[in-house]
Amino acid sequence: MSEIIHEMITEKQITERILQIASQINKDYKGKEVHLICILKGSVFFCCELAKRLEVPVTIDFMAVSSYGNSTESSGRLSVTKDLNEPIDGCHCIIIEDIIDTGSTLSLTKKMLFARGPASLKICALLDKPDRRKTEIEAEYTGFIVPDKFVVGYGLDYAQKYRNLPYIGELEFVDE
Ligand code: IMP
Ligand code: MG
């Protein structure tokens, strides 16, 4: 089996959309400081590009999580493999995620972070795959809605590969 990648969202489209999201966040958080919570590893590229375009004061922290257990239930278990370095109580936080798929990971992450007492907590996702949703969760800021296909690039991986692609592509497996 070999892998072929079909370009789905160009680098130019991503850059333009990030600019639009940034200007919305600049409006929404005017007069406030915003604390970005970047979910490793997939969100790193998106988080950096977005952060560069924010004009409100910005701080950034990183967290790595994964969910396991029965994914058909909304109450799966969350494993935090790298926690935040700083407390978030009283902060206006935005969770930066690469893609919302079933929604399990993000909903558990949001619940856990909410318990730490942030002043506010929103979600900003580069991609949303609503067809696969199992847990009711919605991002306040979304880059693109994508169909139920496996996508890579701009931070998203397949077996840790392709994160560095500057565009988003659909991954296809073909017999050699
Ligand atoms: P879920 O929303 O809990 O199902 O999990 C979302 C996570 O699964 C994302 O943060 C990604 O790491 C990964 N994921 C889901 N769909 C894709 C995809 O199409 N390509 C790459 N990673 C994906
Ligand atoms: Mg992820």
Image: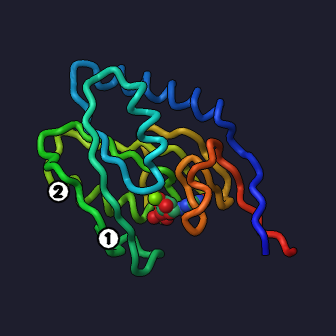
Q: Secondary structure at mark 1?
A: strand
Residue 102 in sight in this render: no
Q: What residue sits 66% from the left and 59% below the top?
A: 148
Q: Nearer the viewer, residue 44 or 75?
A: 44
Q: Position of residue 15 (x, y in %)?
A: 57, 30
Q: Nearer the viewer, mark 1 or mark 2?
A: 1
Q: What residue sits 42% from the left and 25% below the top?
A: 53
Give the residue at mark 1: 78
Rendered position, 25 above or below 68? above
Residue 79 in sight in this render: yes
Identify residue type, mark 1. Leu
What label sits on residue 115 in the rendered view?
Answer: 2
Q: Earlier in the sequence, mark 1 or mark 2?
A: 1
What label sits on residue 68 in the rendered view?
Answer: none
Residue 162 falls in which quadrant of the image? bottom right
Q: Is residue 24 left or right of residue 147?
A: left
| Image quadrant containing the C terminus | bottom right
Outermost residue on the bottom side: it is 69
